[in-house]
């Protein structure tokens, strides 16, 4: 396995050590390897290119927002070719969680994720892009 040497300022080392402690890494090499894998994964799934990706779109929303459930369903059906699965969970009497798994061209997946996350009544939303493993591609994670 090749060795790399990097130089970091004191503040970055302090933050890395805090990250390691919080995530229970036993050494800096493991932490750096996972951080690099995450950056490479995000780069591989970056929108705007003609590559395929997966994305998980998570949204916390207000159950009482007028027609939000119907609007989300209409949006998902309009772009059904991108949808793999959805999960709905009731968090409390007022809040719900919607998780949508999307797959397709990275720019189309990003556009669909944006449509879902921008709906009125969504309180918090995020998209986690993941590259798809194509035949012959190397997998960054171990």
Image (cartoon, helix red, strand yellow):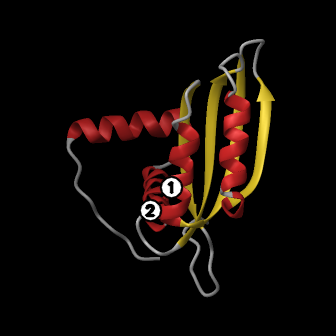
Residue ID at (47%, 50%)? 31
Most foreground residue, 83 or 46: 83
Is residue 140 shown above or below 90?
A: below
- Which corner quadrant holds the C terminus? bottom right
Which image quadrant is residue 141 in?
Answer: bottom right
Whether residue 26 is visible here, answered yes or no, is no
Q: Residues within 10 Å of mark 1 (few under 14, many from 20)?
A: many
Choose the circle earlier in sequence order: 1 or 2: 2
In this orientation, which residue lies closer to the viewer: 13 or 43?
43
Q: Is residue 113 above or below residue 66?
A: below
Is 136 left, or right, of 77 in this rendering? left
Q: Secondary structure at mark 1?
A: helix
Instruction: Tell me which residue sits at (43%, 58%) in the image.
Output: 39
The numbered dot on residue 136 is none
Residue hosting label 2: 47
The residue shown at (41%, 76%) is 2
- The reply to whether residue 63 is visible in this rendering is yes
Quadrant in the rendering for residue 17:
top left
Going 58% across and 24% down the picture, which residue do you hit? 121
Which mark, residue 110?
Answer: 1
Q: Position of residue 18 (x, y in %)?
A: 42, 33
As displayed, is residue 40 above or below residue 101? Answer: below
Disc 1 vs disc 2: Cβ atoms closer than 8 Å?
A: yes
Q: CA distance from mark 1 to mark 2?
A: 6 Å
């Amino acid at each position: 396995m090749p060795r790399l040497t990097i130089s970091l300022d004191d503040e970055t080392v302090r933050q890395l050590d805090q990250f390691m402690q919080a995530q229970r890494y036993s050494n800096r090499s493991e932490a750096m390897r996972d951080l690099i894998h995450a950056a490479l994964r995000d780069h591989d799934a970056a929108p705007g290119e003609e590559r395929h990706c997966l994305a998980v779109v998570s949204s916390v929303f207000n159950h009482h927002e007028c027609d939000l459930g119907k609007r989300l369903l209409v949006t998902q059906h309009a772009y059904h070719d991108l949808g793999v699965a959805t999960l709905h969970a009731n968090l409390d009497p007022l809040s719900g969680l919607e998780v949508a798994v999307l797959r397709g061209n990275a720019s189309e997946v990003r556009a669909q994720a944006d449509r879902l996350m921008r709906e009125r009544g969504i309180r918090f939303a995020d998209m986690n892009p993941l590259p798809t493993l194509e035949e012959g591609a190397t997998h960054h994670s171990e």
